């Protein structure tokens, strides 16, 4: 009896010894022959909601990204940071959010639309005052805005646009807000301010330095001290409800690469922390 059991054990061991290489070979054939790469994982349409001040630079970033990753189509949605935040909260299809203030990103984090692990500061900027190039007046300080020859001053809506929020903070801290708000022409976003100054429809306007660099008929007359307002930072975050996680992660990684950073810097942006 013991001899019979011993024989059966030996037979089983022999069968296992013979079949093991076959099973291992079969299991290996179930795995991809090459490791997956970003091009394989990421595909489809990626919706990026970004502050209007990023419009010019992100169009170039988009072109480069799509050439590098041809399976991903990027759809850019520009607007005031606060307006974009509300769109996301109301269910607008969005994968990436790039506002011009931490305020909007923090609101989405608090309400569960963005995970803190999936966001970070990307860029920084400066607030400036611009006038039309035909304006030959001299400037020494922001007090110039309170003078009688400054009748119309373009400011993006402080309730919905980050640039307007920084502008209101500045004028409040300098105690100029009550004198200037009656002259204010409120716009939907910072790029509309630029348009109004470029066309001569207002006497002055508050924009970012990067907006002034792409202006056609405007010039910078005053750099606003950063001590008068919150830091001008551009966070980037992945929306929790994204349907395209791989592409969103790829975009977030790409905008931090040296080749993307060079483009941002060429348009006047600074990388966060610089």
Image: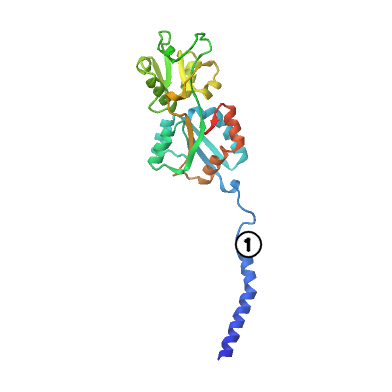
Q: Where is residue 5 in the image (x, y as percent from the top left)?
A: 56, 87
Is 21 situated left or right of 204 in this image? Answer: right
* 30 displayed left or right of 229: right
How packed mark 1 is, by other alpha carbons closer than 10 Å (few <14, some 14-19, many 20 or more), is few
Q: Looking at the image, can residue 150 be seen? A: yes
- Which quadrant of the figure has residue 1? bottom right
Q: Quadrant of residue 26?
A: bottom right
Q: Horizontal and vertical percent for residue 215?
A: 54, 19
Can you say whether 183 is above or below 81 in the image? Answer: above
For the point 40% across and 38% down, the residue is: 108
Residue 96: horizontal and vertical position, in percent?
Answer: 49, 39
Q: Which residue is drawn at 60% across and 51% down?
A: 36
Quarter holding the C terminus?
Answer: top right
Q: In the figure, 15 relative to 88: above or below?
A: below
Residue 230 versus residue 223 in the image, above or below = below
Q: Name the secondary structure under disc 1.
A: helix
Left or right of residue 56, residue 202 in this image: left
Q: How many labels does the image show?
A: 1
Direction left: furthest residue? 178
| Residue located farthest toward the front when viewing the structure as drawn | 227
Residue furthest toward the bottom? 1
Residue sitting at 40 percent across and 12 percent down? Answer: 146
Q: Where is residue 136 in the image (x, y as percent from the top left)?
A: 52, 8
Depth check, front residue: 178 or 81: 178
């Amino acid at each position: 009896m013991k001899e019979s059991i011993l024989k059966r054990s030996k037979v089983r061991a022999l069968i296992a010894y013979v079949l093991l290489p076959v099973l291992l070979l079969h299991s290996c054939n179930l795995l991809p022959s090459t490791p997956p790469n970003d091009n394989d994982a990421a595909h489809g349409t990626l919706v990026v909601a970004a502050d209007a001040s990023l419009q010019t630079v992100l169009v170039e970033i988009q072109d480069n990204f799509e050439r590098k990753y041809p399976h991903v189509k990027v759809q850019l949605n520009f607007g005031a940071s606060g307006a974009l935040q509300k769109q996301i909260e109301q269910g607008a299809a969005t994968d990436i959010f790039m506002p011009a203030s931490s305020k909007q990103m923090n609101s989405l984090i608090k309400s569960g639309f963005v995970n803190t692990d999936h966001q970070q500061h990307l860029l920084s900027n400066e607030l400036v005052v611009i006038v039309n190039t035909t304006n030959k007046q001299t400037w020494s300080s922001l007090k110039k805005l309170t003078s009688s020859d400054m009748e119309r001053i373009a400011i993006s809506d402080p309730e919905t646009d980050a640039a307007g929020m920084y502008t209101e903070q500045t004028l409040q801290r300098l105690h100029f807000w009550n004198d200037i708000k009656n002259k204010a022409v409120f716009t939907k976003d910072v790029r509309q301010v630029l348009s109004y100054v470029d066309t001569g429809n207002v006497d002055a306007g508050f924009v970012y330095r990067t907006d002034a660099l792409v202006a056609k008929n405007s010039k910078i007359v005053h750099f606003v001290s950063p001590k008068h307002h919150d830091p001008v930072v551009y966070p980037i975050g992945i929306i929790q409800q994204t349907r395209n996680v791989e592409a969103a992660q790829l975009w977030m990684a790409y905008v931090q690469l040296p080749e993307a950073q060079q483009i941002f810097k060429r348009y006047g942006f600074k990388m966060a922390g610089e």
